[in-house]
Amino acid sequence: MEHTHAVIIGAGPYGLSLAAHFREAGIPFRAFGHPMHTWKTQMPVGMKLKSDGFASSLSAGSQSFTLAEWSADNGRHYHDTLIPVPLEDFIEYGEEFARRFVPNLEETNVTAVVREGRGYRVTLETGETFHSEKIILAMGVGNFNFIPSFLRGLPEGTVSHSSEHRTFDEFNGRDVTVLGRGASSLNAAVLLSELGANVTLIARSRKIHIHEPTSDKRSFYQKVRHPLSPLGVGVRSWLACAWPDLFRILPAAVRRIIVFKHLGPAGGTALQGRIHGRFPALLGWSIDSVEAVPGTDQIRMQLLGPKGEKREHMTSHIIAGTGYRVDLARLSFLPEELALQIQREPNGQPTLNRNFETSVKGIYFVGPAAAASFGPLMRFAAGAQYAATRITDHVRRELAREPQRSRSTVAVPSMTGQ
Ligand SMILES: Cc1cc2nc3c(=O)[nH]c(=O)nc-3n(C[C@H](O)[C@H](O)[C@H](O)COP(=O)(O)OP(=O)(O)OC[C@H]3O[C@@H](n4cnc5c(N)ncnc54)[C@H](O)[C@@H]3O)c2cc1C
């Protein structure tokens, strides 16, 4: 059976960055996935990124190919902090990154990973099987969208997750209720209202947070007191970006609180001025019960207000902007017995060592699934550089110790760079 040293599953910011680093280091690997697929299929057309331009680059190792450089080459409006990045630009940039730095990317899916000998037997959608010592999962959150159980019993077509909509045209003129106050919910509610749907937003929290753009004319004092980092302005965000490895050695309870509390739900700067007064928002309200009204296309919701008051709310569709929960059981290509052997954090994310490796030798996770171990930076594309650098160093060191292990029947294309 054909053999390679490492397999990267996923071609978003993390998988592509890691593949670029591996190529540069001469590590034998194969990479799979459709480039920027989550961004192309699960985010709404017209969305602007929440992260600043300077915090939205992929990492190509020693070579530089930032979003700023791509934007300049392609005549796009760009500013490190003041111009929100259009989703479409970010997708094009990622695709160009893949063409330049990961020409060996195979645009197909992995369908099974089974432990075999010293590594894993990998099966592809095409039917091909081969062997690899290491499996690196860079699959983002696309497989983990979460809909609360009380919504799951409603008739088909009346409830959807925010990630299911690229456009909202089908809701023009309809009553739609959006749950949540995170970026996905706020984006959906704004786009729906601008399209002409009768949208209502319901959120348990009493406040909606929208990021402020960071001025590039801050005083020296402001810069020191409130440092700017890829996660925004503030000392805590700065620390999370500067030392993800220190985050990992914090006590589990402290990590849990930080992951849960730091950078709570908020909309990006592009939503400024597009929410308040544009559509009804029931803030501080929670859902007591929900049921389909027989013989109609209506959903009846009983709501509980901030002071315990009750209210009935009718709608024809609910969009749950209720986020993502990593659940390894939902990775259909990982056999249950293998998934169960992976030690997890209380929030379901895998526990990772300093090299992003799980408790099962040879299985690694990068990206949002690594946030419980390495902190909030991993929830954003900006964390790709740290993750790619760390894993590449680790694999390179291992191979240097045992050079015979790098022998592979799979050719690593030579580095063509730009
Ligand atoms: C609405 C929304 C807005 C966001 N905005 C921002 C933002 O502004 N800035 C930011 O930094 N982050 C943002 N994020 C977070 C963002 O999802 C992550 O930062 C980023 O996508 C993580 O990158 P990734 O490479 O881990 O995964 P992804 O980009 O999700 O890529 C996953 C890859 O895995 C591949 N894949 C899946 N299954 C298989 C399989 N079986 N075989 C092969 N390949 C497979 C897919 O094809 C895809 O290529 C946002 C998330 C959401 C939901």
Image: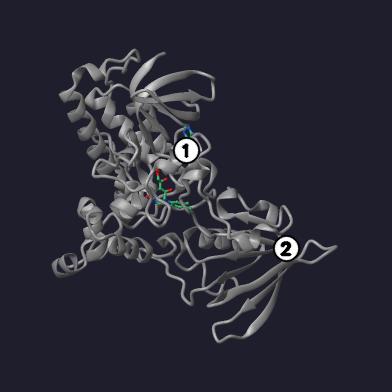
**Residue 141 versus residue 229 in the image, above or below:** above
Which amino acid type is shown beneath numbered disc 2?
A: Ser
Residue at x-position 54% and y-position 48%:
45
Note whether 83 is above or below 275 in the view shown.
above
How many labels, in total? 2
Circle 2 crowding by C-alpha within 10 Å: few under 14, some 14–19, many from 20: some
Q: Which residue is denoted by mark 2 in the rendering? A: 316
Q: Is residue 375 left or right of residue 293?
A: left
Q: Position of residue 331 (x, y in %)?
A: 50, 40
Mark 1 closeness class: few <14, some 14–19, many ≥20 residues within 10 Å = few
- The response on whether ligand 1 sits within 8 Å of label 1 is no
The location of residue 70, given as percent across then percent down, is 33, 38
On the question of residue 83 being in view, the answer is yes
Question: Type of residue at label 1?
Answer: Glu
Q: Note whether residue 262 is visible.
A: no
Furthest-right residue in this view = 295
Instruction: Determine the residue positioned at 24% across, 26% down.
Output: 24
Which type of secondary structure does the marked residue at label 1 adopt?
helix
The residue that label 1 is drawn on is: 337
Which picture quadrant has residue 98?
top left
Q: Quadrant of the C terminus?
A: top left
Q: In the rendered structure, which disc, 2 or 1, sits on the residue that comes first in sequence?
A: 2
Give the label, 2 or 1, closer to the camera: 1
Foreground: 296 or 290? 290
**Residue 287 found in image quarter:** bottom right
Which residue lies at the image location 59% right of the left edge and 54% below the top edge? Answer: 161
